[in-house]
Amino acid sequence: MPPIDCEDQELLEGFLAETTELLEKLDDDLVALEKSSEDSELLNRIFRSIHTVKGASSFLGFDLLVKVTHKTEDVLNRLRKGELLVNPEIMDVVLEATDLVKILVSDIKSGDIQEREIDGTIAKLLPLLSETAAVQPQAPPTEAEPKENGSTQSNPAEQAQPIEPSAPAPGPDPSAVTKPEATPTPPQKIGGDIVPKKAATPIKPAEGKGEDLSDNTTVRVDVKRLDDLMNQVGELVLERNRMIQINQNLQQGDVNKVDFNEEFSKLTKRMNFVTSELQMQVLKMRMLPVEKVFKKFPRIVRSMARDLGKEVDLQIFGEETELDRSVVDEIGDPLIHLIRNAMDHGLETPDERIAVGKPRVGTLVLAAVHEGNQIIISIKDDGRGIDTDRVGRKAVEKGLISEEQLSAMSQRELFDLIFLPGFSTKEKASDLSGRGVGMDVVKTNIKKLNGLIEIKSEKGLGSEFILRLPLTLAIIQSLLVEVEGEIYSIPLSSVLETLRVDQRQFHLIGGQEVLKLRDMVLPLMRLQKIFNVQQHYEQNDFCYVVVVGAADKRMGLVVTRLVGQQEVAIKSLGNYLANIPGIAGSTILGDGRVTLIVDPVGLIDGGEGGSGR
């Protein structure tokens, strides 16, 4: 059947939606199967997923997809019948085939169906269907058998790999599944020179290709949420009508002042309540469970563990935690790099762990939880921990800091050295790490989200990286501050604490104003100087310092006074005023004044060179 035409767009969209959903769950199921090979229900679910994709793609005429899913289904069928036993080598091939299926579906979704090389992957699946020669020497015609696709399925049932010798003749049943494919598929001569290389390229651990299936242009919404939204819109209409009526009465002079004040007060409260509820409902519709990102990590961890020769137990908690889709889209890369770091630098090999009295299997915990208007994501391992002495030496060796700077650093500042561009403790670069870019990428992406990074580590016991991210980037909780009569808004997600201090406690180090705060030296920036605000009041010895953070950096913003906390909607300043350092946008206050929203990331990046009075 030729591919469907544009009139069947709805049919195609249905196929893509269903297939994407099935494939998103497949990686998790396959990795889980390797640990629970006796789980027949899980194996049947995996088989049904591939079978469904094969059936739908066959109906729609996607031939390449049919061929790959067809052979993958045959292997899974033998696994669920006990004719093959689940082992890492078989799972490698099945996962490779699944990745190829994802790529083919991604081609269909993009409308760019290519003639991709699939023979290399199929060539790896075929031996799992026709290894009778190795098991039953009395059946010599093995070279001819694979050429008859209908018959290759009947003989493998009797191979010796299974431990169930009672699976003789009934095994041929799968041939009914394979018969429809009439394309002659030669065995081991299949594209021996070029196909395997070509086919292997897109089958890397699912760090990119698997993500392509996620459709970020549409979002599924629970019908109950739509019902709640409609109810709130209905309430808003009622309050609008009430407001129109009050305005008409006011215009006609038919108003008693006491009654008007009471009615208008009621209207204000109702409008505030309904608007807040409406805002919450719309935000919830933009929310996605963090599972959208977490679901690819079991596969990545499995692949890395096999590459590194390590045994790892990945534990995931809080995958149902929701956050804005704009944040979900950005956190994938930082988390991948943090997991790579934990796998390569943190966790030891089984022999190393046993030597220091630890279980041979390392533990990696990925967790998410809501806390106020933030989401906290934690990546924790029970590995080596961070050796701050080694980190400090490496930073000096690479010329990233001086010996004097190193001697003055606190524990937290030593941890933060790993985020420096070009820093790595690896002696030799490998495919996995050692180039000094991974943690720098984490820092850059978390900064982009106005998030914070905190590190906890104890040498020999493990490390924990904690990310604090805003729930949404559209409407934010902010701290309003005054600077010589001007009001500025600082995103509350970046605010760590506020202090009222005597300016006589400030010190000048190398032209930079600083404040000694507990175990750290806090660099200071005066918003009055940065935004060139004129002096209106007499200089006071006391002022307020707002401690803000961006990724691993901390800084104190000096302001005249704190106004209060308020929820604000971020408004763009337009192309002409875009990319002003230190300004993230603007908002409009209740009195109609336009207030600039401070960008802590821009200020910290721009202020690292020093700032004075």
Image (cartoon, rainbow, N blue to C red):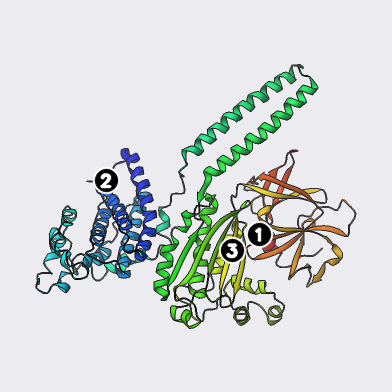
Q: What residue type is labelled 3?
A: Ile
Q: Which of marks 2 and 3 is nearer the N terminus?
A: 2
**Residue nearer the viewer, 609 or 227:** 227
On the image, numbered disc 3 is attached to which residue? 466
Residue type beneath disc 2: Leu
- Give the distance between the C-alpha atoms of the residues marked 2 and 1, in whole angstroms: 50 Å
Q: Quote the CA–CA distance across marks 2 and 3.
A: 46 Å
Query: Which label is found at residue 60?
Result: 2
- Say few, some or many: other residues with alpha carbon within 10 Å of mark 1 (under 14 / 14 to 19 / 20 or more): many
Give above or below for 553 relative to 44: below
Question: Alpha carbon of mark 1 to alpha carbon of mark 3: how far?
Answer: 18 Å
**For residue 588, side relative to residue 94 (left or right):** right
Helix, strand or loop at label 2? It is helix
The reply to whether residue 420 is visible in this rendering is no
Q: Where is residue 15 shown, x and y percent of the image? A: 33, 45
Tag 2 near tag 3, CB within 8 Å: no
Q: Which residue is drawn at 46% across and 76% down?
A: 359
Image location (x, y in percent) of residue 194: 27, 69
Instruction: Locate residue 428 relative to residue 393 in the image: left or right.
Output: left
Placement of the C terminus among the 4 image quadrants: bottom right
**x then y, percent, for residue 574:** 63, 46
Residue at 68% in and 58% down: 600
